[in-house]
């Protein structure tokens, strides 16, 4: 039978990295096994679900390249089917109406807590055979004894005695189905063979298995994936910075870097860190997922991102970078060819946002110098050096790296100083930050006109400070 996996997010917010990793594992397993991957939107909680969240999830799946073979299915469009299955469970004696009042249930709970017992429904209405009414809920008749055994692909064998479970509500008084019921019906109807999901759902699994059994459904295989922690050992949350997948996009990360990063959280293949998509698909297996939680490490993600930026053809980086340049508020229309610039600069940055900032000086005039650098480099003694450079560059016809370099060499000789005494102030004069690749290549890209103009500004600046 062909493998069928799914990702079943509740659209109550953006897609966060934990959800994305669960989706990735399900997707990888389906792709590896030549099976199908299904997207299902669990939007029955109408108060917390929003269209914007649905869109955010779809956008994130698309950006990450996690394509689905079926769906997105929406649970809100399947209420008719849930009603049908609930009726089936009532008919077969696996479910019953319950009219226990809120007060009764609260008092029960209080008593159990006082006795240090796990709060659970006491089965008060289980054998009453009550008819339906406006205030009755429907409960599932959980088996009273025996064990539920889960042979989890990640956790190993998990055994839960039915005495620890209770008769859970499967339909509210208004007739709407509850989460555990909808998941079961969908997993059954959609013929899921493997349920790969966060281990925060492990306590739902025995209940879902019991309902599946009552329906005579084939049981899927489960794999509960450990959670992702922040660098402080606590569950990853907003406190740790960006957790939304699309926030990573905004912050200048590439989807392949995030995917590569996520796959290595709780899964490994020897010491290998870099995986192409094809390699991931070939090497991944659910049984190799670790049982312990893994910690999110932004530095490692940055390292991977830099790797992927560095190894992309400049024309691809140029295309990807344009929106970030636009957002940074400048344009590359007037200045060096962006691809030529990227050949030199793209390996220097960990994110596209940083890259857009790094090359800004080539296209956009800066308003001030890095203060510390200016103090250090723009001393009065530098003035004649910069003036000499300005003169020589103004005379230079062949604006090529080699000739540009020769001018620096000549100046070093004329003034009888070290290379740094010429190169550093020159670099600060043209970049404003003091940061750039080799000075000859930098000036070649910046162009003659801009170089001269910036030398003029630096000279004016030093004269002013000098006074
Ligand atoms: N909708 C659930 C969630 O977003 C997932 C349910 C499942 O994977 O079974 O947490």
Image (cartoon, rainbow, N blue to C red):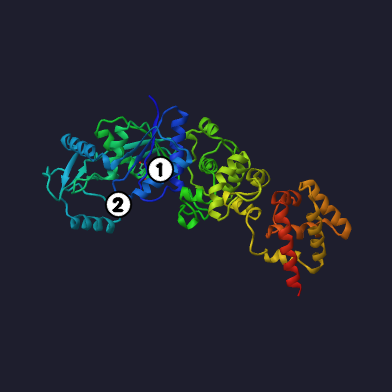
Determine which of the numbered discs, if any, sits on residue 118 in the image.
2
Q: Position of residue 180 (x, y in %)?
A: 29, 43
Q: Is residue 168 left or right of residue 308?
A: left
Q: Local crowd at mark 1 within 10 Å, few (<14), some, or many (≥20)?
A: some
Q: Residues within 10 Å of mark 2 (few under 14, many from 20)?
A: few
Q: Which mark is residue 333?
A: none
Residue 448 place in picture, x, y as percent: 73, 53
Asked whether residue 227 appears in the rendered view, the answer is: no
Quadrant in which the C terminus is drawn: bottom right
> Quarter-wise, where is residue 369 in the image?
bottom right
Task: Determine whether the residue tagged by mark 2 lies in a helix, strand or loop.
Answer: loop
| 60 vs 85, nearest the viewer | 60
Of label 2 and label 1, which has the lower sequence position? 1
Q: Quadrant of the N terminus?
A: top left
Which dot marks residue 58?
1
Q: Is residue 19 left or right of residue 74?
A: right
Q: Nearer the viewer, residue 423 or 104?
A: 423
């Amino acid at each position: 039978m062909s493998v069928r996996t799914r990702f079943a997010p509740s659209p109550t917010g953006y897609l966060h990295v934990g959800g994305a990793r669960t989706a990735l594992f399900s997707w990888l397993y389906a792709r590896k096994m030549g099976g199908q991957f299904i997207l299902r939107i669990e939007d029955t909680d109408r108060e917390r679900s929003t269209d914007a969240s649905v869109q955010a999830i779809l956008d994130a799946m698309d950006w990450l390249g996690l394509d689905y073979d079926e769906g997105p299915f929406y649970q809100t469009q399947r209420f008719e089917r849930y009603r049908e299955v609930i009726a089936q469970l009532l008919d077969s004696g696996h479910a019953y109406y319950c009219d226990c009042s809120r007060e009764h249930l609260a008092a029960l709970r209080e008593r159990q807590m006082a006795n240090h017992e796990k709060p659970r429904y006491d089965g008060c209405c289980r054998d009453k055979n009550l008819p339906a009414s406006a205030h009755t809920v429907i409960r599932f008749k959980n088996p009273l004894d025996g064990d539920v055994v889960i042979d989890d692909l990640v956790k190993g064998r998990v055994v839960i005695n039915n005495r620890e479970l209770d008769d859970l509500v499967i339909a509210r008084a208004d007739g709407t189905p509850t989460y555990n019921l909808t998941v079961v019906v969908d997993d059954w109807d959609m013929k899921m063979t493997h349920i790969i999901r966060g281990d925060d759902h492990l306590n739902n699994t025995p209940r879902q298995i019991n309902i599946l059994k009552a329906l005579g459904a084939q049981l899927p295989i489960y794999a509960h994936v450990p959670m992702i922690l922040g660098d402080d050992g606590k569950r990853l949350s907003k406190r740790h910075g960006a957790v939304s997948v699309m926030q990573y996009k905004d912050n200048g990360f590439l989807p392949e870097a995030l995917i590569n990063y996520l796959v290595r959280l709780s899964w490994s293949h020897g010491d290998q860190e870099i995986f192409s998509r094809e390699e991931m698909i070939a090497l991944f297996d659910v049984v190799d997922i670790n049982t312990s939680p893994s910690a999110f490490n932004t530095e490692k993600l940055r390292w991977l991102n830099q790797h992927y930026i560095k190894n992309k053809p400049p024309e691809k980086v140029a295309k990807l970078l344009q929106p970030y340049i636009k957002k940074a508020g400048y344009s590359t229309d007037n200045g060096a060819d962006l691809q030529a610039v990227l050949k030199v600069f793209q390996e220097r940055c960990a994110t596209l946002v940083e890259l857009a900032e790094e090359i800004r000086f080539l296209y956009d005039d800066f308003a001030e110098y890095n203060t510390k650098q200016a103090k250090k480099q723009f001393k009065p003694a530098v003035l004649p050096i910069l003036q000499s450079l300005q003169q020589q560059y103004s005379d230079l016809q062949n604006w090529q790296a080699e000739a540009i370099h020769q001018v620096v060499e000549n100046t070093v000789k004329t003034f009888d100083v070290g290379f740094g005494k010429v190169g550093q102030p020159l670099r600060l004069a043209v970049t404003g930050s003091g940061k750039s690749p080799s000075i000859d290549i930098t000036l070649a890209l910046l162009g003659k006109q801009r170089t001269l103009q910036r030398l003029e500004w630096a000279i004016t600046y030093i004269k002013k400070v000098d006074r």
